[in-house]
Amino acid sequence: MLLIPLLAFLFASLLVAAAAMALAPANAATIERRLSEVLTGERVAQPADELYKVWQDGSLHRNFMGYTVQKSSCLLGLGLSAISDTGHAYAQNTKSLQEYYRTIASGRPAIRKGYFLREEDKAFKQHILEIACKGHTTLDRTWDTQLKEWTLPVLRDLEQDGLVRVEGDEVSLTKEGQPFLRHVCKAFDLHLLHARPQA
């Protein structure tokens, strides 16, 4: 009974892999390395690189799979523990192979958990994407209470370390901060900040 869903899953996986290879001239590790080199200034990326061009024109995007030249309103995760992003919600597939096949065989999606984004989540996600893809963001003062309580104290510490520059509502990654991009993005991750033990 599992043979037909398994074959369908394998066929779908092959189609996704073929599409990914057709769209991306290099593998994800190469693209990630190239972008890291562009952002950190370790090596100037070749102007002919598609990733470099979208970074230059400000249209670079990042999703769960890494940096991409194409922005999509929906990312469909296939396979074990894959994460889907609709822009309004996240859904993660089960991590258990047996549960995954059992659920798919029953005709249901193999989603194990999900989360609907609140407006606050969407606003702070946008800050993270702007820092990660453009190296700067403009603070959305609609969320001033959260910014003052959670984000700005972290940004002040990062600014003292020379990793960011905060001027009014503008936050910019410095050249010294580029290798610490992920750490800077954490300043906008309210879920992470709320879970952190208070000093």
Image: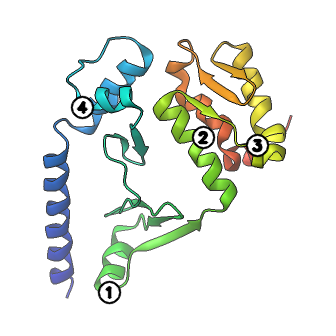
Secondary structure beneath label 4:
helix
Q: Position of residue 184 (x, y in %)?
A: 61, 29
Task: For the C terminus, give its image quadrant.
Answer: top right
Task: Tell me the residue at 40%/41% (across/down).
Answer: 61
Secondary structure beneath label 3:
helix
Q: Position of residue 67 (x, y in %)?
A: 37, 38
Sequence order check: which comes first, mark 3 or mark 2? Answer: 2
Q: Is residue 122 left or right of residue 169?
A: left
The kind of residue on which mark 4 rests is Glu
Q: CA distance from mark 3 to mark 4?
A: 34 Å
Q: Nearer the viewer, mark 1 or mark 3?
A: 3
Tell me the residue that label 4 is attached to: 50
Tell me the residue that label 1 is attached to: 107
Of residue 139 and residue 23, the one placed in the foreground of this image is 139
Q: Is residue 131 left or right of residue 164?
A: left
Secondary structure beneath label 2:
helix
Q: Nearer the viewer, mark 4 or mark 1?
A: 4
Q: Is residue 3 left or right of residue 107?
A: left
Tell me the residue that label 2 is attached to: 127
Task: Tell me the residue at 31%/46% (across/down).
Answer: 70
Task: Tell me the residue at 38%/59% (across/down).
Answer: 75
Sequence order check: which comes first, mark 4 or mark 1? Answer: 4
Tell me the residue that label 3 is attached to: 141
Q: Position of residue 5 (x, y in %)?
A: 21, 80
Q: Are marks 1 and 2 in contact (CB under 8 Å)?
A: no
Sequence order check: which comes first, mark 1 or mark 3? Answer: 1
